[in-house]
Amino acid sequence: MTGSRARYALLLTIGVLAVAPSAAVAAQTIHVVERATTDAVTNGSKQDKVGNVLTWHNKIYDAANKQQIGRDAGYCIRIIVGKSWECSWTTYLETGSISVQGQFLDKGDAELAITGGTGAYAGANGTMTLHYRNKQGTAFDFTFHLQ
């Protein structure tokens, strides 16, 4: 190849690599149940106030809420007393993990952003719907909408 052809071929290769899609998680929906048994406000105050920190590490069950299939761990910071927290956590499943971030409401469903993952979920994005299974807030449906 002449110098200009070689440069053209190199630029064409770089251009193709720059626009080629990276390996992505196939679009899918994963439904699991979290049993919230370890939740604790860890900053020393029992009073509900802005800035409180909530931490946990709970077991994750299949959609039927029968068999344990993983665990999760995370934290939230109280933003609006009696209404909402801002949270970040990871759900660990057999084939990898999925991380989320967003608002957790004291009452009612919420939608959080999927911010990444590992293993089978490496490069994950999309949303996760959180649904209260009971009024006590001791069990939640997590439905991951991977795109």
Image (cartoon, helix red, strand yellow):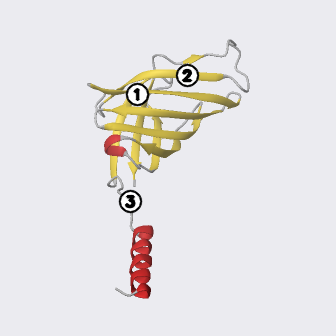
Residue matched to label 3: 22
Does residue 77 appear left or right of residue 97 in this picture? right
Q: Secondary structure at mark 1?
A: strand
The amino acid at mark 2 is Thr
Mark 2 / mark 3, whichever is N-terminal? 3
Choose top left, top right, bottom left or bottom right for residue 58. Answer: top left
Labels 3 and 1: the sequence-earlier one: 3
Task: Tell me the CA gap for discs 1 and 2.
Answer: 14 Å
Residue occupying image coordinates x 38% and y 59%: 22
Please state the horizontal and vertical placement of residue 142, each as a whole percent of the image.
41, 37
Tell me which label, 1 or 2, sits earlier in the chain: 1
Other residues around mark 3 within 10 Å, as few (<14) / some (14–19) / many (≥20): few
- Residue that extends furthest to the left in the rendered view of this protein: 67
User: In this orientation, which residue lies closer to the viewer: 7 or 66?
Assistant: 7
Q: Quadrant of residue 19?
A: bottom left
Check whether the beta carbons of the residues at disc 3 and disc 1 lie within 8 A of each other: no
Q: Quadrant of residue 17?
A: bottom left
Residue displayed at 33% across by 37% down = 96
Q: Which residue is mark 2?
A: 55
